[in-house]
Structures are given as structure tokens and as C-alpha cells.
Amino acid sequence: MSDPSEALASAKAAADRIVKVKRLNACLTPIKELRKSLVAQASAAHPSGVLYGMPVAIKDNICTLEFTTSCGSKILEGYRSPYEATAVAKLKAAGALIAGKTNCDEFGMGSSTEHSAYGRSFHPFDKTRVPGGSSGGSAALVAAGAVPAALGSETGGSVRQPASLCGVVGIKPTYGRVSRSGLVAFGSSLDQIGVLGRSVHDAARVLSVISGRDPRDSTCEERDSLRLPNVPESLQGFVIGIPKEYLPQDLDPAVRRACERAIRLLRELGAAVREVSLPHTAYAVPTYYIIAPAEASSNLARYDGARYGPRFNGSEDVRALYRTTRGEGFGPEVRRRVLVGTYVLSSGYYDAYYRKAQQMRALIAQDFRNVFDRGVDLLFTPTTPTPAFKAGEKLNDPVAMYLSDIFTVTANLAGLPAISVPIGRIKGLPIGGQLIGQAFLEDEMLEAAYALERAVPAGEEA
Amino acid sequence: MAGAWETVIGLETHVQLRTLSKMFCGCSTAFGAPPNTNVCPVCLGLPGALPVPNEQALKLAVRAALGVGCSVHPRSIFARKNYFYPDLPKGYQISQFDQPLATNGSLSYLSPDRGVATATIQRLHVEEDAGKSLHDRFPKQTAIDLNRCGVPLIEIVTGPDFRSPHEARAYLLTLKQVLEYAGISDCDMEKGSLRVDANVSVRPAGDTALGTKTEVKNINSFAYVEKALTVERDRQIAVLEGGGTVAQQTMLYDSKTNSVRPQRSKEESHDYRYFPDPDLPPLVLSEEFIAEQQTLLPELPAKKRGRFVEKYALSVTDAAVLTADRAVADYYEAVVHAGAEPKTAANWVMTEVLADAKDHGDGLRVPPGALANLIGLVRGGTVSHQAAKRVFAEVAERGGEPRNVAEALGVMQVGDTGVLAGWVGEVLSAHPTEVARYKTGETKLVQFLLGQVMKASRGKADPKLAQRVLEEKLTS
């Protein structure tokens, strides 16, 4: 597409499709504002860009100049960022259209998009179920066909988990592959912007555009943008490891069936498949739930009502201002994590929790290096332990909710790239399989994902 | 009353690095801008904004560390110091904690009590400044100015090495000299570019265990350093002599009343929950980088002082005065290099030059070459020392070559014996009594008569020649 009238048509069509799926509560931007902005963007977009005219929705915790950035939180209700995220600026420079802000768990804290101050999002195929989270709005919009791709963000699986539950592709790049500038921080050492797409190709195209160095982020690697691989004829020469800890005895039998079919297909494509072990896997969730809240407790300290965002009643002195703003502005899950994080960093507990968790994180990363050092190129695992669960099912059981990230948190802890690809349906609900790659070798991971995507009858029951 | 007690003081000095931009963003560090104008998403702590270290600040910090003899660590860690305060927009300050930039240094200074003494520098670390809360700008409201927020600082922590308030002050002045010399900081306490907190305790003289310390804050000017520490020391001694115990707490100094008061516990934060800042990778400095900063350090005051004593045969005191300020030391050396005799040049710089500089915003207004020429005129007998001071003032004010200025002022000494004889003749006929007394043996009256000759010449007579003419006439 390089014709301005086509970009305009694309903008209007995207707005129409987003209106049609309003019932999902996936897009937070008011439709009138969205339509107006899309039209304006289409006429200003640069026709030579590689994503010219492509509508891309943006998770609400990524700063945009176009729309508010509330992070699914009351504490940032109506907040307009005076600058935009590097990833968003790169999308615009490539001609993409910013197609509204998507609903998410507050500050990315959650796995169901139920922890949003703006109401829960709905699973596109079953309104009694959740789309996953925290990038649930992005996943639902893509799954419903409203946009070909959307940006999400990951701290422990928030792109791949909803991708798996909604039947779309979700990529979490290597830590440092995409600038975090403008991504509102949750757990800075784990956070990465990721992409949800209709297909591996759509997601990869967007990832390639947003990747690369950024002088605004000291943790972003000094590397060129990711180059897109070709779709391979076969997976001859690939060694794919199956970590046994990710297919435990008590895994949902239908999920196991779907994974076994996917593994068989990988073999048929020519890959050598072998079982491997990542012995510290069992400690990943507890480790994650120390490090992420610790960083969050500090990252969220700035929301105090003193400079921006709404103030709440009872602000007679500064301590009261903090108390009411943070007490009323944050939802229960955020408050829970800020409390946990504050606790694990406090003197007297730091060594027992935070330091221990950092040591365990190093061991988990070492597990992966050991496997990759022994000639394994990629790992294949289920993305999630179950398909989409019912709304409310895990809302009052935080640990059950946390365990839905059990297969995804390790890639964040180790900083590795990972992708979720649909591998079938279970009673009509999609389920994803995960490929975990080596740091900065997204191209290899994407090649295998292309091949798997083509081989899997994704709409079929597993 | 301090006699039976020994005072123990350690200093924590915050110094603003002399950079154009802030520690983690590109905002200006200029002092005195309208409130909240030197700000951006990073130093405002807006959602999603990330810090990126300022390389110039790191260079200056490393130079400072080397200047106070520290080992600079090839790897150090930025840490977050978490606390809530309205002028701290992120809810944490980026600082360094258990792995600072540099440790283990020392700084030698001249103690007024003990002569040359050494302060240990326990650590030097890099951090960002907070903003400013203005409680008196609007009634019953607090205004916040975030211009200072993110300004680069180093904190320099000494051991409990000082034994008196004036010793602490002497260290501080030496530290200031070093930092100013190396262009690391302006060290202007009034503008907040140098701030001092002090740990103070007392113990019975002869004890080796340390007493309970308090931290004295809010010392806003060099003039108050000694006063604040003295007040706190005396307070502690009074408490102990009254049978009480010193509470470990933070004391705020009030310069208006010259007193200290305990900081309200509400203002204190007990647990900063330090942890490594995940937004900033470990600060890794190569050997080459550190070595390069070493080569960029100028000759520091102590070394320069020693060299001046050695090379120019000056007293330690004179050398200390001349090297207290790098610009003055450079000026002095330029005067000497332009041909002036070192000792005479030192006297000129320490008196006329420094006095003139003091009155004119530290400006060294007479070019070093001109001063050397002027000194030459005195030495050659062309201008008297007294007249040379007038020439100096004139050159400082209006410029010009000293010889031309001296001519224009009419202060060139007269060495023509005919003219001198005329003045001598006048004086001898006006003072017959003194002449008679001289002739009966009161030879020291020659000085009085010479004075009269100088007066008659209005200072222009060459004193040596005039005396010769005078003595010839008196004995003829």
C-alpha cells in the first residue's frame, strides 16, 4: 500500500471494525476521538514507510501523543503524556496508524484484564471468559479481526498468555531488543514491549520496526533493528528441546495433546526434537513474585497526586494526599504488589527475599544457557496451562492467577525472546504453544514459528 | 568547657558537578531560572521516562575521586533510595549504595591545631539532586521547584577524623580548593553547589570509643560551618555534663539564632529500601577512561604549594596564600615568567593584586606582563615603591603600559643630580637648626632631612641618589 486514499480507507475500516467489537471492552479510546485521529494520521502518514496505513492498537501503558495513557488505572485517569514511546514513534515513522489504546490489567499487573479500572475485557469467542492479560485488550482486538497487530507489554507473560488464550501470535523480544522509553514501568528489569499479531508475519513485521537502539533507554542494546527471516522450507538442522518441567504429570490432558501434536509437526518439518531439563523451573513463579513487586513498589512511588493525575478527597496535608491518592487511585492487585514489594525490600528482609530471588534468577538464566550450550537451538513448551478461564474464576485467588504465567515468566527472568503460536483448540477455545529462543536470535525463533504456524491446523480441536 | 572533652567530627559533603546538563537528562543546570522551566519527562519522573547517565558528569566525578586519592572502581552500581517527598518526583533518588564509584581516599590539609593532617575519604559516590520545596512562597501552601531535580552531585564522606570545628572547616576549605582547581565544581554554598552535613560526637578526652553521634544538617554557608559544629558540640557536652545522654538524631542548624533543633521524626525516613536501579546497567569504567581522567587533573593545591616553596624559595605560608586559588597561582607564575623576581612578585600578588581582586569580583585586572614591568621599574629605580602602587591602581582601572602611566602621572623618579641639588638646597636653607645639629654629630637627622627632600620633590626624587646628594652637601 502506498496510495494515500488506501491509507485513508484503511483508517476508516479500522475504526469501523473497532466499533463493531465494542462489546469486548478491548479499546479504551472513545470511538469519535479514535476515528478523527485515524483519519488525521492517515493523511499525515509517510507513504514510503514499511507499515504504511497499517492500523496498530497500543496497550494503555505505552505513552502516545494521540490518546490518554492511563495504564488501566484510576490514578492516571485522563493522563496525557507530553511525549511518546520510542516504539510508537518508530511505528509512526514507518507509516503505521495508532489505532487507539487497549484495555489492560492495571499497570500490567494481572493475567485476565479483570484488574482494569475501566472494566474487564471479554474473550472474543466466549463473553463469560477472560481474554487473558495483562495485554488482554490488545489480544482481543487482534483476535476479533479489528486490527492486524497491536503492541502489548510483558513483565511475566502478559503478551504470550493472552495470545495463547485468544488464538493469536504473541512475541516477547529479548530484553533490550525494544526500547522501554515510554513504556510505563512495572518491573523494569523484566519489562519489554511485545507484539500481538494475526500471524507470525504481521507480528514480526511490527517487531522489526520497533526494535533497535535508543539513546533514551540505557538498557536497550546497541543493535540494529531485527531483520525479518524468510519462511523456511523445512526445519532441517534445527534442534528443539522440550523441557520436561513444562509438561508436568498434572498438565491439562487436552493441552498436552495439543503440545504433542505440535511437537510431532516440528519433527515432521525436519527438526531434531529432544527432551531437556531446566531444573530450577519450579522456583520461577516465586522468584518472579518477589522481583517484579519489588521493582513495582519503587516504580509506582511516583503516583502520589502531587504533580499529575487526579487527587482524591482528604488531601489536607501531604501525607494525607499520598494516602488518599494511592489508597483510592490504585486497585487491590496493585496495592497488594506494592505492599509485597515494599516488604521484600525493607531492611531485615532484603537478604531473605530480594537477594535470594536475584540469586535464583541467575540460576534460572543459567539453566537456559546450559541447554543452549549443548546444541539446542530453541525450546518448545505450552504457553499456558489452560485455555481461557471464566471471568471471576481466579479473581479472589491471586496465587491461582499467578500460576497461569507459570510457563511464561522464565523467559522474562532470563531475558530471552519467546513467541506464542496457536496450536489448536480445546472445546472451541484456542491454545498456544511457545517457542523460547536464545538472546537476540529472534530470527531463528521466528523461522521455526513460521513453519509451525503453517503446519498447525490451528482452528482444529487438539 | 571543651577541655575535658574531645570532639569527633566526620563530614558528608554534597558537591554539584560543573556540567551544562543534568545527571540523567539533557536539561540545563543553570542556576536562577524561573521555577520549573529546566525540566523534561525524565527529571519530572513522568510515566515511562528513563534515565541515561551524563558522561561529562561521570568524568568529573572520576576526576574528583582521583583528586582526593580514592580508588575508582571499574564497576559500580546505581541504586534507588526510596522515600516519599513532594520535591522527589520519582519517589526515589538515583544514588549509589553498597557499590559506590570510589572508596578509600585521603586528603591532606593544614589543621589549625595540628599542622599538616590527613582526612580519610571513606567513599565518593554519584547521585542526582532533588527539587526544592518552598514553604514561604505562598501562605499555607508549599510550592515545588524542580529545576534542581536531577542535577548531578557527588557525595564525599570522610571518616570521623576531625577533632574540632575549625579543623573540620580547614578540611572543607581544602576540599573546596581541590574541587575548584580541577574544575569539578563551583563549590558555591550560597547557590547550593556545595552542602555539608556533619556527624558530631564528643567523648571524654583520652577515650578511644566514639560517643553517640548526631547529624547536623542545614549548614548553608562556609561562615556557619564552624558555628554550627561548635553549637552542637557545646550542646552535647552540656547534656553529658548534666548527667544526660546524647540521643542519636538529626539536628537542624538555624543560622539566624545560631542554634540547633532536632528534626521532627516525621521528617526522617527510616528505611530507604535501597536496591540496584534496574533502569541503569552497572557503571563500567575502562582503565583507559580512568587513566585519561587522571591526566586531565591539574596540579592540585598541596603539590603546587610544595613546588612554589621549592622553586621560588617562598615560605609555606606565602605559598599557601598564592596557591589557594588556581587562577591566582597561575597569575603569580605568569608574573614570574614575565621576568619579575619571585619573592617581590609574591609580595605584590599577595598585597596589591589580591586586594584589588577582592574589590572587583575576583578579577585579576592588571595583566601579569604589566605587573612584571612595573616591578622592573621599581627595581631599576625609575619609580618608587609608593608611586608604583599608584601606577598599579591606575593600570588596573584604565589599563596601559606601566612606564607610560608613570610618566602620565608624573611619578617617574628624578635622578638628575642638578635637580636633586636644587631640592636639597631648598631643604637645607629651610632647616638651619637641624643642619647645625647634624654637624655636631646627630647624623641620624639625615633621614629627617631626606624625608623633607622627598616631600619637596613630591615623591619624585630617587631616594638613593637624593641621599647621596644630601650627604655630600652636608659634609662639604
Image: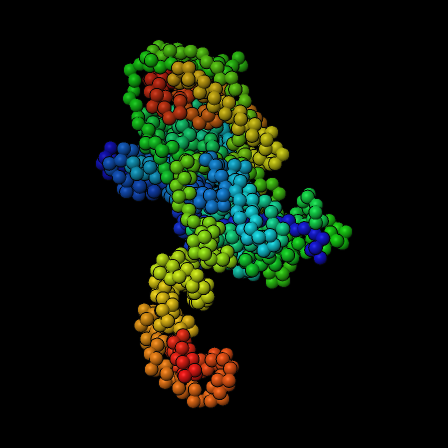
Residue at image x 28%, y 21%? A230
Residue B62 quadrant: top left
Q: Is residue A20 shown to the viewer in this render?
A: no
Is A403 rendered above or below residue B192? above
Query: In the picture shown, does residue A88 fall above or below B316?
Result: above
Q: Position of residue B124 (x, y in %)?
A: 51, 43
- Residue A92 is left or right of residue B2, and the answer is left
Q: Quadrant of the N terminus of chain A?
A: top left
Quarter of the image for residue B58 reads top left
Vertical arrangement, residue B378 with respect to residue B113, above or below: below
Residue A414 place in picture, x, y as percent = 46, 25
Relative to the observer, which residue lies in front, A397 or B85? B85
- Coordinates of residue B90 in the picture (x, y in percent): 50, 44
Evaluate whether residue B320 shows in this view.
yes
Tell me how many marks there are: 0
User: Of B14 and A411, which appears nearest the observer?
Assistant: B14
Q: What residue is at 49 percent from the left and 39 percent from the top? A: B71
| Foreground of the two, B464 or A374 | B464
- Look at the image and name its color scheme: rainbow
Q: Residue at x 63, y 34 (%)?
A: A348
Q: In the figure, A346 relative to B445: above or below? A: above
Q: Residue at x 52, y 40 (%)?
A: B103
For the residue pair A201 and B208, the one nearer the viewer reads as B208
Report x, y in % for residue B279. 46, 37
Q: Residue furthest left?
A: A3
The C terminus of chain A - image quarter: top left
